[in-house]
Image (cartoon, helix red, strand yellow):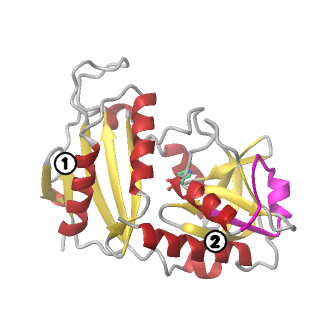
Amino acid sequence: MSRIVYVNGDYVPEAEAKISVFDRGFLMADGVYEVTSVLAGRMIDFAAHMARLRRSLAELEMDAPAGEAELEAIHREMIARNALEEGMIYMQVTRGAADRDFTYPEGAEPSLVLFTQARPLRDTAGARNGIRVITVPDIRWARRDIKTVQLLAPSMCKMAAKTAGVDDAWMQEDGVVTEGTSNNACIVTAEGTVVTRDLSSDILHGITRAAVLRFAREAQVKVEERAFTVEEARAAAEAFVTSASSFVTPVVEIDGTAIGDGTPGPVARRLRDIYIEESLKAAT
Ligand code: PLP
């Protein structure tokens, strides 16, 4: 069965979906997106994804493509039409089509596209075995807090990881870790404290990161939001990443160095279990 995608008001089979060649998402990467995970046919943290979308749009002075109630209704319709039980919903918003110019056009209608990806999120090889990462220079722009569709730099970093025969890359600047190519990076100290980079324009403000830190604090796990070095990460007791698609996934190797005993650590495993359990309870 071909997927049904949403394009500017219409639900169409994916092969029939069309967007203008003058769309600024295509010409300028002038667009933002959100990715919401779906478990048991229900969305995880939808309100938080909407809040981040609002912020991304405001930072770029971009009009919203629809009201939030309508965006929610479209998400639900996409789940229903694609019979999505477990997987992701991508929502892409661009400034729309206009003759090519660097300044923002006046009066362009934002483009809105949604598509789904059905895939297992709970039972994954990464969750079972952990993932291996390398560190690479962070070559992205200075506004990583805006969730834009300009994903070429993280694609290049991810390809470097693939070429090196590992699962992902952690990006670093001057020896300090910013985040993973599509996830937030965390380590656990020998004392059991979860350490992850503090929020700024240097990283994306992950929705999963926020939820996991909240759950960790509620479970009496100490949390420190601060920068940490690659060296500190390699010597950590545990490491893990957080994202809407990977939840909490243990990192068992950094730059060829085994983390802890080289298997998924107890803090990461526990936080993953809590995250899934609590997210299922609160899913909408
Ligand atoms: N950091 C980056 C660079 C990302 O691309 C993502 C997700 O795509 C994240 C962090 C995790 O964010 P979230 O938990 O909202 O999925």
**Disc 2, SS:** helix
Q: Percent position (x, y) of residue 25?
A: 33, 37
Coordinates of residue 105 in the picture (x, y in percent): 28, 19
**Residue on which the image places disc 1:** 7
Sequence-first disc among 2 and 1: 1
Mark 1 residue CB less than 8 A from any atom of ligand 1: no
* Residue 117 occupies quadrant: bottom left
In the displayed structure image, the side of residue 263 where residue 140 appears, left or right = left
Q: Quadrant of the N terminus?
A: bottom left
For the residue pair 161 and 19, the one nearer the viewer reads as 19
Of residue 245 and residue 252, the one placed in the foreground of this image is: 245
Of 5 and 267, which appears nearest the observer? 267
Look at the image and give the residue range highlighted in magenta: 220-241
> Dot 1: within a 10 Å radius of its alpha carbon, few (fewer than 14), some, or many (20 or more) residues?
some
Residue bearing mark 2: 271
- Establish if 56 lies above or below 263: above
Quarter of image, res 13: bottom left
Q: Is residue 87 above or below residue 15?
A: below
